[in-house]
Amino acid sequence: MAVFPERRTSRRAQWAKRLSFFAGVLFVVAGFGHRFGVVDTLAFLSVLGIVGMLALLGLLLAISGFSRLWRYGDKAGKASLAASLMSAAVLAPFLIGAFCALRYPMFYDVATDPVDPPQFERAASLRTARMNPIVPITPENARLQMERYPEVRGRRYDISADQIVQALETVIRSRGWALSGSLYQAGMPEFVIEAYAPTLVLGFPVDAVFRVTDEGGTTFVDMRMNSRYGRHDLGDGARRVARFMSDLDAEVTRQAKAIVDIPPSSGGEEDGVD
C-alpha cells in the first residue's frame, strides 16, 4: 500500500492571514475612533501608515504562500486567498488616495473666489502649530484652481440676505456640520458664517466659511473650505464645495416654492362674507 507524505501547512500563508486580518480590524477600530473623536488625527495618520504596511506585508506573504502551494503542495490555498482578499480591501483606500494625489492638484484650501476668498475669523484662532496655517491663496494656486475646478463658483440669488442665511443654516445642519461662528446681523452689506465641516466617513477636520454679500436686489454667496491636516485634500475640498452650492441652489428653490404654495387664509373670506 502506497504511503503519501502528509502535506505541510505553510507558515507564511498563516502569517499572511493573521497580518492582513489584524490590519483590517485595526483600520476599522481606528477609523471609528477617529470619526467619533476618540483618536487624535495625527495619531490616526500614524496608525494608517502601520495599517498599510501590515496589509502590504500580508499580501506579500500570501503571494509566497501561493508559491509554496504551487511548488511544494503545501496547505496554503485558503489562508493565502483570505489574506489576499483582506489585504486588497484594506489597501484599496490607499490606492484610491494615491490615484487622487496624482490626478488632482495639491490643495488643502479651496474657494469659489480664490482671488479674493472669504476670510476665516474664528477658525484661524483654533489652529495649532501642527495644523495647516490659514494663509492667503497664492496667485498660482488661484489660477490653477479656476482652471481645474471651473464648477467651483459662487452663486447669485434673487432673494434677501436674511433668506439666504436661513437656507445656508438649513443645508449646513442637514450635512451634520456645526456652526462655529456667525458675524451676521440684519442689514449688514457683507458678513461671513463659519462652520466645522468634518469629512463624512473618517471625520478629518475641515473648516468652512461662507461670505454673503447683499447687493440690494440680489445676494451673492461665496464659500471656502480649508483642511486642518495634510497638504493635499485629494480633490475632496472642491467636490464638497461644488456639492454644497448645488444643495444650496435646491434649498433656495424649495423655500421659494414653499412661499408660493402657502394657501390663502380663510379668515379674510369669512370676514368678507360677513
Image (spheres, grey):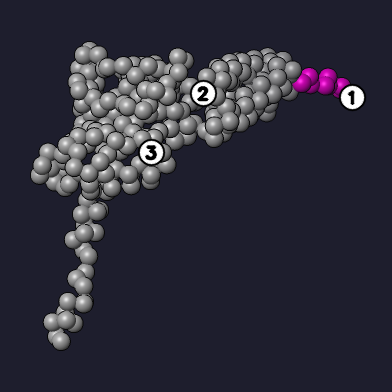
Q: Main secondary structure of the magenta part?
A: loop
Q: Give the spatial CA distance, label 3 vs label 1.
A: 80 Å
Farthest residue to the bottom: give it. 274
Tell me where residue 60 appears, x and y as whole percent.
Answer: 60, 15
Give the answer, above or below, for where 84 lies relative to 164: above
Could you say which quadrant of the image residue 3 lies in? top right
N-terminal-most mark, 2 or 1 = 1
Q: Quadrant of the C terminus?
A: bottom left
N-terminal-most mark, 3 or 1 = 1
**Can see residue 241?**
no
Tell me where residue 268 appears, x and y as whole percent.
Answer: 17, 76
Instruction: Please report the residue visible at 34 percent of the width from the left and 19 percent of the height from the top.
Output: 134
Q: Which residue is the site of mark 1?
A: 1
Q: Which residue is the site of mark 2?
A: 41
Amino acid, disc 1 = Met
Residue range corresponding to the magenta coloring: 2-9
Instruction: Please report the residue visible at 22 percent of the width from the left and 46 percent of the height from the top.
Output: 162
| Foreground residue among 27 and 133 | 133
Give the answer, above or below, for where 241 lies relative to 164: above
Count how many numbered circles sit on residues in the image. Answer: 3
Answer whether labels 3 and 1 touch (C-beta < 8 Å): no
| SS class, disc 3 | strand
**Can see residue 25?**
yes
Q: Quadrant of the N terminus?
A: top right
Amino acid, disc 2 = Thr
- Pair 3/2: label in front: 3
- Pair 2/1: label in front: 2
Amino acid, disc 3 = Leu
Q: Which residue is the site of mark 3?
A: 179
Q: Is residue 71 left or right of residue 101?
A: right
Tell me where residue 14 appears, x and y as whole percent.
Answer: 72, 22
The verdict on residue 24 being magenta is no
